[in-house]
Amino acid sequence: MMKMNEQKHKDLGLCKMSASSNLNIITTVLKARFKIISRYKGALLFEFFIPIVFAALPIMLGTAIAGGSANAAVNFQNNTAYAGNPGTMDYKLYMLIGASTFMTVMLMLWLVGYWIRREQETGTLEPLYLSPAKKIYVVSGVTLYALIRASITFFVSFFLGSLIFGVNPFQGNILLAILFLFIGLIPLWGISFLFGALILKIKEANSLIQMMQWIVAFFMGVYFPITVFPPFLRYIAMAFPPTWMNNGVRASLLNLSYFFGTWYADLAMIFVFGAIVPLLGYYVFLQTERRMKRNEGVGQF
Amino acid sequence: MIQPIIKIENISKTFISKERKKLFRAKKRKIEALKNVDLEIYDGEIFGLLGPNGAGKTTLIKCLTTLLLPSSGTAWINGYNLQKHENLVRASIGCMLMGERGLYWKLTGRENLDYFGALYHVPKKIRRKKIEELIELLKLRDFIDRTVETYSSGQKMILAFAKSLINEAPILFLDEPTVTMDVHAARELRSIVKGLNENGHTIVYTTHLMHEADELCDRVAIIDKGEIIALGTPAELKSSIEHEDVVNVEGTIPPNVVDNIRALPGIREAIVKSEGNGKTKLGILCENSRMMLPKIIEVMTANNAQIEYINPQDITLEDVFIAKTGRALSIDTREVVKKRKIGGQSSR
C-alpha cells in the first residue's frame, strides 16, 4: 500500500513562500496595527502626556520639599553625586528622561502583551495560527509597531515636556543618547516575548501589568539613580536591560557617569542583553505556545 | 485509484477541564474529545462532518488545522504530516472556523482580506486581483470598504468565507458556514461551495443541519461523543436503516407516551425531535409503518394525546443519527444552546 508521505502534493494555490513574502508579512502587520490605532485617535494623543505627568509629580514634590527650584537643584546634585560622579542640578530633565524611557519600556511591554490578549478576546488569534505565516514575522510586525510608537512617544513627550518644564533638551551628546535608546529597545523586544508568553499562560493580565509597572519603575531608577540602592537591589536592577538604557540616555545628555565608566562599555553590555534576551524570550514564547496547543489551544481565553 | 488528500490515523484528544466547585475550588476532569478517529477524505470530494454540538467535530477540525496537538495519533493533509510539516499543512488549507469572530472589526473588509492574504504568502499584485475576484463572486462591493464593525452578522460571515478563499488552497475547512445566514444567503453560499468543488477543491464541511449535508456532501461521517459512528454517502447511510420506516407525529403529547410507544413490539426507537408552545414533534423508527400506524394511534389516544399531524416519511440523515445514537440531533443542539445562555457566555 502506498504510504501517505510518498504521495504527491497538490500545489499550494496562491501561497508562494519566499523571503519577500515574509518581509511582506512584517510590513502588512505593521500597517494594519497603525490603521487600527489610527481609528482610536484620542488614545495616541493622550499617550504623549503620560510621561509628562509622571515627571511632573516628583518635580513638584521635590521643589516643594526643598523650598524652591534652586534649593531642589542643589539638593539633587548633592544626592546624585557619588564616587567621582559630579551629579546634576538639572533634576527636571533627569525626571523627564526617566519618565520618557519608562513610558517607552511600558509601551513595548503593553503593546505586545495586550496585542496577544486582544487577539485572543476578539477571536483573531486563531486565524493567525491557522495561517502559514511564521509567528516570528507576525510578532516582528507587532513589535516593530510597538517600537515605532514607543519611540515617537519618547521624542514627542520628551520635547513637549522640556517645553513645559522650561529645560533645554539639546544638551550633552544627543546622538549617543538616541543610540542608547535604540540599542536599548532590542533587549526590550525579547522581554516583550517573555511578557507575551506570560499573558498567553495567565490570560487576564491587567493586575500583572499594574504590578509590573511599579516594579519596572522602581528597578530602572525612573526618579533616582540606582546607586542609592543597597548592593543586593542594585545587582537586581542591573540585571534588567532597561536600567542600562535609562542610565545611558541620562549619562549622554546630562554628562553623568556610565555604569562601566565609558559609554562604549555600557553600550556593549546592552548589545549582550540584545543578543541573549530576544532568543530567550522567543524560546519561552514557543514553549508556552506548544503547551497551550497540547491542551485547550491558544484561542481560549 | 482515488488518493486520500486527508488521512487521519488514530487521532485522540484529551482535555483537562476544570469543573468549578466553589469560588476558588476547581476539580480537574479529563475529557476525551476524540477517541481513536480513523478517516480518509478523498481528493475532490465534499466531505461532511455531522454531529451535535460537543460531539468533537470542531476539535477534530482544530487538530487537522494545527490549532490543537492531538494527544495521540497523526494525520496527513495534502501529503504533509500534521506534526512534522505544520506550515505546509497550513499553506494547503483555507479555513472558516470561528465565523465572524475571526475578523478585525476596526479594519475594512478589503483591509482584512489583504491582511490575511499577506499571512498566506499571496504576492501583493495577485492578492489585489484575487480580492477583486472575491468581491465580484461573493457580491461584497456594497460594504467591502466599510469597517467590519458596521456589518450585519450575515455580511461578517460572508467576509469570513471570502477570507478562507484568499489563498485558493486545495483544501477548504468550513465549520458551520451558514449558521447566521438567512435562507437565501445560505443557499447562495452552498452553490458557491459546489462551484469550488467542481473546480477541484476538496471541502470538509461541518454542520448540524442534516438537509445541508444531504444536499452538498459526497460522503459524510457522523461523529458523536468523539467517535465516528457512521461513514458513507448520504444514500448509503440512509439505506443502512432502510429496512426501517420513519413516522413523524405532531400534537399535544404527554411525556409518558414516548415510553409507551417505545415499548410496542416492532418499534425500533421513539424520540422527541422538538418541543415548544405545548406542541411536541415525535420521530418514530419502526419496522413497518403501515402495520404499526394503528397501534401507535391507539397508544396515543389511550394516553390522551391529541394528534394534529401524522405521516410516514422518507428517511433523512437525522433519522440515521437517531438510529445510531437513540437521540435527536435537534434536541441535542438546542440543549447546548440553552445551557450556554444560562451560563451567560459571551463572545466579545
Image (cartoon, coloured by chain):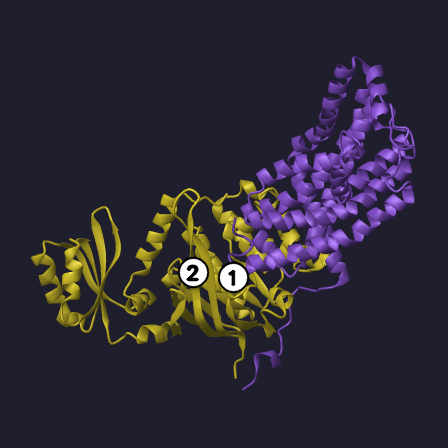
Q: Is residue A208 visible?
A: yes
The chain painted yellow is: B
Q: Amino acid at mark 2?
A: Lys
The quarter of the displayed image where residue B200 is located = bottom right
Residue drawn 90% across the image and 31% down it: A85
Is label 2 in contact with label 1 (beta carbons under 8 Å)?
A: no
Q: Nearer the viewer, residue B208 or B37?
A: B37
Quarter location, residue B235: bottom left
Q: Is residue B232 left or right of residue B116?
A: left
Q: Is residue B58 left or right of residue A95?
A: left
Amino acid identity at mark 1: Lys
Return the x and y of residue B34 as percentages of the image width and height. Answer: 44, 66
Circle 2 is placed at which residue position? B30
Q: Position of residue B309 (x, y in %)?
A: 18, 57
Query: Residue under mark 2: which chain is it in?
Result: B
> In the image shown, does A32 or A71 lie closer to the viewer?
A71
As displayed, is residue A299 above or below residue A155? below
Residue at (40%, 73%) from the top-left corner? B231
Q: Which residue carries the number 1 mark?
A: B62
Q: Identify the residue shown where x is 81% and y is 40%.
A: A245
